[in-house]
Image (cartoon, grey):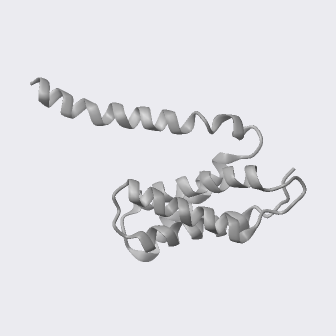
Amino acid sequence: MTLTFKRAITPGVLAASLVSATLLPIKPAAADQNIWRDIGIGAGVGAASSAITRHKVVPNIINGAAAGAAVNQSRDLTTKKGQRPDFLRDAAVGAGTGAAVGSVTNRRHAVRNTANGAAVGAVINILTPKPRR
């Protein structure tokens, strides 16, 4: 009974701690830019790419949302005030994050994960082209 209880509870506890540890550092940056917008764009691009490629929806949404958050944070750190964000940098950050998240979630399609992340970075750059304030 104890072993069954541990096997049932441990993954949920680990997932909750991972999510809380991941989202807490993002909070201070949310005051500067709208991170939720970029996470939503990333999730939408992930859902659209899964519809186009006819693959699983949830892993692509997770991949896209993570890429959107990473693109938002990289824009905050690398773009000077009054300067427009760089298209290639956004696509590269999205691609790297897509590949990393795909390896963490045990998805075997590295090229697809990278392409999904790059698409997220490109779409975020196209939809939010305003210079940083």
Q: In this view, does 121 lie to the left or right of 15?
A: right
Q: Position of residue 36 (x, y in %)?
A: 64, 46
Question: In the image as oriented, which residue stretches furthest toward the left?
Answer: 1
Q: Where is residue 104 in the image (x, y as percent from the top left)?
A: 39, 54
Q: In this view, does 5 lie above or below 110?
A: above
Q: In this view, does 10 lie above or below 95?
A: above
| Residue at the image point whose x is 41% and y is 33% from the top | 16
Q: Where is residue 33 in the image (x, y as percent from the top left)?
A: 75, 46
Q: Position of residue 6 (x, y in %)?
A: 20, 28
| Residue at the image point whose x is 58% and y is 33% from the top | 24
Q: In which quarter of the image is residue 13?
A: top left
Q: Is residue 65 left or right of residue 121?
A: left
Q: Quadrant of residue 122?
A: bottom right
Q: In this view, does 20 lie above or below 89?
A: above
Residue 31 at least partly seen: yes
Residue 43 at least partly seen: no
| Residue at the image point whose x is 59% and y is 65% from the top | 120
| Residue at the image point whose x is 19% and y is 34% from the top | 7
